[in-house]
Amino acid sequence: TSAYSSPAKSLGDPGITPLSPSHIAKDSDADDAVEQLFLVVVAIDFGTTSSGYAYSFTKEPECIHVMRRWEGGDPGVSNQKTPTTILLTPERKFHSFGYAARDFYHDLDPTESKHWLYFEKFKMKLHTTGNLTMETELTAANGKKVKALEIFAYALQFFKEQALKELSDQGGSDFENTEVRWVITVPAIWKQPAKQFMRQAAYKAGMASPENPEQLIIALEPEAASIYCRKLRLHQMIDLSSRAPVNGYSPSDTIGTGFTQAKEHIRRNRQSRTFLVENVIGEIWSELEEGDRYIVVDSGGGTVDITVHQIRLPEGHLKELYKATGGPYGSLGVDYEFEKLLCKIFGEDFIEQFKIKRPAAWVDLMIAFESRKRAAAPDRTNPLNITLPFSFIDYYKKFRGHSVEHALRKSNVDFVKWSSQGMLRMSPDAMNALFKPTIDQIVQHLSDVFDKPEVTNVKFLFLVGGFAESPLLQQAVQSAFGSRCRVIIPQDVGLTILKGAVLFGLDPAVIKVRRSPLTYGVGVLNRFVEGKHPPEKLLIKDGTRWCTDVFDKFISADQSVALGETVTRSYTPAKPSQLVIVINIYSSEQDNVSFITEAGVKKCGTLRLDLTGTDASVPNRREIKTLMQFGDTEIKAMAIDVATSKSVKVGIDFLNY
């Protein structure tokens, strides 16, 4: 039996039964007229390895400002974003975030540092935890555990304060949180609980509240990238230029034509941190026509997210053609391969011990690797040197009784040598081998997507996200798919999502059609039909034979849903005298679900409509309308008693059932 007992049996009342025929009303215009009251949109790209924010004032939406540069960048790593690392004091209070957290932790004495709680790359936990709840914990570098919700809330609060401070400094007066619309990006392949978790963390950080949820938009990363990659071109052609664009630029553009000037322009403006979105557009966009399809491959630190979009003119709205897919094939995979290589050379027992005993030095070693990782390229011939921290060399000698050099000699890993300057010297082949498993998975996954019938005739493939900066990944994607479509990598590719998320916050209606990731429905009673319904589902109440646990479907997994679309069903109490009506909402990853007791069906909401005290002259077949509205990443449900207009609302909840 399922974890859910039959609603009918457990409630002691017969629940609801569909009023036939069930009809669907679509009214997606109802919510379009929301007043825009925010002065500024701030988007936070909360990444696995690095994070950042950008903003735009609603009065001048064509200017996107990327956050101030951070103190303490790394050599060989451009730091427009800051590492996603967080440090708590031994008393578990927030201490610092980003480079500041890392450097402070690093400078602590080892005897002291073991009491501090340091977290990095913790976002992956939301992707990998199957049964995520508000109680899920994260493990710090010293092995201590803290609730994930607290860590995420601390991180978001840090960004909130940084952004408000920057806005206040810029405007010369204090900026209030109420004046900001926040956008937080999450991978499209995350399951619903993880998306809801981000919203809860943002509420805890004080960015928005359950009473005022519109203040926060959860945006999907590849959608944000997609908007940046092309919304501008189309909107420019339609709004700004009455005459035909010349070579992809409207005649009013001062910058002239061609992509090279645009690049030049960005390079000159790099210092200003302000991107004029109009000028950064090359001429490929003007080639996109109604119905054209393109793939966005968002490859970050933790995950790779693949979405297929289609353009709908005249406004250039996006339509998602195929549900988001992907997996944990981010650049972290390369770090794991490096770690495996170190285990092979120095022994897994030593590496495990070293990470626990010298966590700060381990962080140091991974930083050194990060900057070399970015230097890897397909045509590279000279070796890459990775500095081993002194404490690594020292601790290894104590642990094993012989030198690091000796270990390298006898490990017969031929691509890695010891250099006299105290460095690991890796041949380019050795470095490329570390990338191979991850890149192969990305290419394989993309091949699978290209084989889907929905994905024929793709015109462009946009490669975005931090990992897209890797020449090795660029070359692999180009050589695998260059013959099928044009592979495009935007300038400043690591900031694409951030800028797109700002644009999304300025105009959330640009995404028009999504694919539902799950099947949704409610549990109902149907009249029992011999031979059709399983006998164990038979329930006899007041002489009527009911079939219990029926899953009445609202929408199927992978069905197209227009944003804001409402699906309506009508029910009636199975027992006319019943005064409390409980409607349970269920979800499943499967398409065809018949009963709520099937494997994989999860309860994700309850509507409780209390009809006591209502007039007795209600018609004998009372109609209860149930609506589900499919919003951005939130889904709202509502039940209305038609006779009295009494209603009750609920947000779908994946974390608390």
Image (spheres, helix red, strand yellow):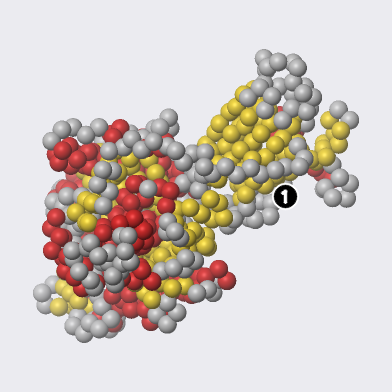
Residue 354 spot, x, y in % from top left: 26, 59
Q: Is residue 419 left or right of residue 374?
A: left
The quadrant of the rendering that contains the N terminus is top right
Q: Residues within 10 Å of mark 1 (few under 14, many from 20)?
A: few
As helix, strand or loop, the secondary structure at mark 1 comes to: loop
Residue 499 spot, x, y in % from top left: 29, 55
Placement of 55 over or under 178, stated as above or below: below
Residue type, numbered disc 1: Ser
Placement of 401 over or under 151, stated as above or below: below
Please give the count of numbered marks on the rendered protein. 1
**Residue 411 in view:** no
The quadrant of the rendering that contains the C terminus is top right
**Camera-side residue of 371 and 546:** 546
Q: Is residue 497 left or right of residue 2?
A: left
**Residue 311 in view:** yes
Residue 27 spot, x, y in % from top left: 57, 42
The residue under label 1 is 594
